[in-house]
Image (spheres, rainbow, N blue to C red):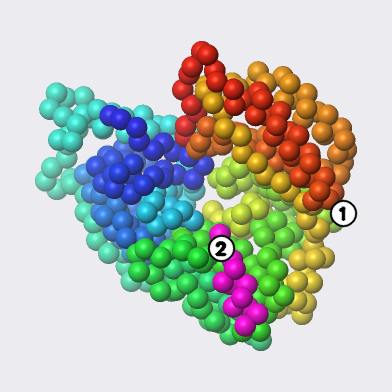
Amino acid sequence: MGTRPRFGTDGLRGVANTELSPELVLALGRAAARVLGGGTWYAARDTRRSGVMLQAALCAGLASEGAEVLDLGVLPTPGVAYLSAADGVPGAMISASHNPFGDNGVKLFGPGGRKLVDAAEAAIEAELDIVLAAGADGGSGGGAGARRRSGAVVGTLRPAPAEATERYLHHLVSSLEGRSLDGLRVVVDCAHGAASTIGPLAFERLGARVDVMGHRPDGANINDGCGSTQLDALRAAVVAHQADAGVAFDGDADRCLAVDHTARVVDGDHMMAICATDLQARGLLPDHTVVVTVMTNLGFRHAMAAAGITVRTTPVGDRYVLEDLDAGGYGLGGEQSGHLIFRRLASTGDGVLTGLAVLDVVARSGRTLADLAGAAMTRLPQVLQNVVVANGSVQAALATADPLWAEVRAVEAELGDEGRVLLRPSGTEPLVRVMVEAATAEQAEALAARVTRAAERCLSAPDPHGGDQLRG
């Protein structure tokens, strides 16, 4: 069957039409319908050139297993999740998020708009192997891979009702519960992606004066010099327009980063700190708790402790944040990258919702975003390095790297409570990611270099026993 993409921290991704071929995506559609059910499904895409092709393939696979697929067209990932949750049906999104336009991916939601848990992904992977092993014609020798429907039990694909997108837009606007953004001037960078229409509309309907950029997708310009991963153009536009703030989404608009009126970036940690302290002050933060990932800056944790807010930590990935939110009945969680989950309102990160929530605090407080971000937390300098694992399993290499862990303990002792060290296996590559936070940038750089050198000595040397590199 050859090499193919595996499920990572946020669905299945690869180079469109090669790694992520229409044949593979069709088979994935069949497998997903078998595992998640073949009733009604929602499906949408971002603005990549390959999106229509791959959505057609996925929907063909779903329909082959009896699904009735409602095509939402171009819509943000959280829009699919919202409609799936509202209507209790599974959903699928064709997107590679912040990746270059040549990549694409498939994100799946179970009934209720939730990203899939590990067990569900494993079941779909196993079913996908069966479908692929049966061959392109579905097989002729019986068995699970050869099951075929015909006649009236074959599924269909049709446009979603016209009001579906309006329902999601109404959901965004109503999140402010009757409040407005009157008097605020906002630059909205849509990354030439899925929020190119609906993002600016949400801010305009709430009374903001909106200047839009990155809203003319041509199939190839998604995330190109714009959006949440490339903020220079937004920073310049905020200053040029003398705006109160700017917000930037990624290609499928499930994340958001902001820029204040001085052109300073306000990342996911700062936005979460602003929202957490605001909710806490209004008595709206369940159990005085937020949920973050291991990558969240130590400065956030210090700020939350000072505010009387408990911080819970999960692995990287907003689905793990969601699992912990639901397990404890908490209300707010997210990631440094700008995936914020307001659990009362959403089952996944929603970039537009996040931007509206942050600017709602600006409007209600009468303070600038710069003032709010500075008061909410002080970010500790953070240095990130990657170390290639030459051979073998990344986890196994880390487990036996005793000299590396000795160096980590020495660095942690030097940092005390004023910093931390994190070693994390990549979810998609044979890499170990080294993160060091410290009181000063110079200290963080120096200590990160020490840990990285130790990691390279332990992990990058050739392994005489060979072994497969970790994927997935």
Q: Disc number at residue 230?
A: 2
Residue under the image location 40 percent in, 57 percent down: 101
Can residue 175 be seen?
A: no
Q: Secondary structure at mark 2?
A: loop
- Crowding around mark 1 (Cα neighbors within 10 Å: few <14, some 14 to 19, many 20+) is few
Residue at image position (44%, 38%) is 7
Instruction: Find the magenta span and give its range.
Output: 228-240
- The disc label shown at residue 306, or none: 1
Nearest the eye: 41 or 140: 140
Q: Amino acid at mark 2?
A: Gln
Q: Position of residue 259 (x, y in %)?
A: 66, 70
Q: Residue at x 11, y 46 (%)?
A: 151
Q: Is residue 252 visible?
A: yes
Residue 297: image location, x then y, percent: 74, 49
Identify the mark nearer the N-term, 1 or 2.
Answer: 2
Q: Amino acid at mark 1?
A: Ala
Q: Position of residue 392 (x, y in %)?
A: 52, 21
Q: Secondary structure at mark 1?
A: helix
The secondary structure that most of the magenta stretch takes on is helix
Q: CA distance from mark 1 to mark 2?
A: 32 Å
Which residue is situated farthest in the top direction here? Answer: 465
Up/down of 38 relative to 45, above or below: above
Q: Residue at x 54, y 53 (%)?
A: 347
